[in-house]
Image (cartoon, rainbow, N blue to C red):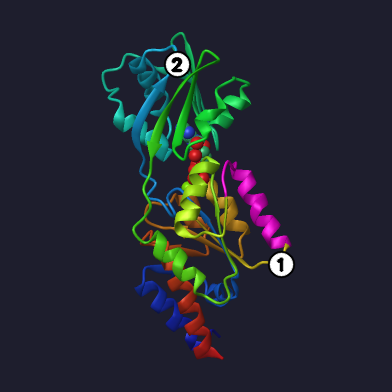
Amino acid sequence: SIPLGYFGGIGAASQNGILFKGSNYLDLITKVDTVVMDKTGTLTKGVFEVQEIVTSNIDKNLLLELVAVLESNSTHPIAQAIVNYVKIDNSKLKATAIEEISGYGMKGQIGEYEVLAGNSKLLQKFKIPFDETINSNDKTIVVVAINQQYAGYITISDTLKEDAQKAITNLHKIPKIIEVVMLSGDKQAVVDTIANKLGIDKAIGDLLPEDKISEVEKLKAMGRTIAFIGDGINDAPVITIADVGMAMGGLGSDAAIETADVVIQTDQPSKIVTAIQIGNATNKIIW
Ligand code: ADP
Ligand code: MG
């Protein structure tokens, strides 16, 4: 039978908006020494806004219309930002041969134009040359290629969640935690700026979904006990392999929530700390 302490722990967690899917995780979470986090939608709000449009040899409005028509076929938060910014309700353009390339971006045919919109890795994948200096600043960008030629980029910005700083600061106060890591598909310069600001120990950007898995595997091979927290469809495999897989339950994708051991229903990253504290308190009652 389950010790009474576990019922108390699960109840206390639930009152704090934290769903433990099994009492064993109340125990396992107290052994976590490495917390690995996704950036977009976990530490940041995941709500992007268009800031700036930079074009090369193409009309700015045409570039925007082409990209928005293509992105209207994606549910990625970056795509939503572009579709919200560019009014395409009256657009006569239609995309065909649409491909969503996970971790890279979108590809499609719009009339006479073959359009690519995504990160710079997408252009590299299609062997399209571009000026590498567009990656030097700490702004998230959507790079565009039209008919296999670099055509410009759109700068977008996201904002940190209100409690992101509290989450990292308080994780560092837990004696058992030796490292807080951030893994992201975004540019390294963006990731570095956020990591420095929040005091994250290690931050790796430019990662494909499968790269996030191998980073967690590497930490596991070092003997670490890992909690991973993410929100996206892409995060589900990483949530599965972590010792304690955690998902953001409010805005998080169904796949992430289903595979998670622990769901943070309030979307606040600081609840990771609360979950560990409840685990510690529960175990004190039992032993
Ligand atoms: P993350 O949540 O770490 O950003 P994703 O795998 O969702 O991870 O995305 C990785 C990167 O791929 C994004 O930062 C973006 O550069 C690019 N990307 C993915 N989907 C799109 C899209 N629909 N439009 C533009 N860029 C995209
Ligand atoms: Mg994400």
The residue that label 1 is drawn on is 223
Residue type at mark 1 is Gly
Asked if the beta carbon under badge 2 is closer than 8 A to the nearest atom of ligand 1, the reply is: no
Magenta residues, as a range?
A: 204-221
Residue type at mark 2 is Ser
What's the mark number on residue 234?
none
At mark 1, the secondary structure is loop
Location of the N terminus (image quadrant): bottom right
Q: Residue at x 62, y 26 (%)?
A: 125
- Could you tell me residue 148's position as x and y percent? 55, 15
User: Relative to 148, is 272 above or below?
Assistant: below
- Could you tell me residue 248's position as x and y percent? 43, 57
The residue that label 2 is drawn on is 56
Residue 18 picture quarter:
bottom left
Specify the principal SS of the magenta part: helix
- Could you tell me residue 88's position as x and y percent? 30, 22
At mark 2, the secondary structure is loop
User: Relative to 26, is 55 above or below?
Assistant: above
- Does residue 20 appear to the left or right of 162 in the view shown? right
Location of the C terminus (image quadrant): bottom right
The Cα–Cα distance between marks 1 and 2, rounded to whole angstroms, is: 49 Å
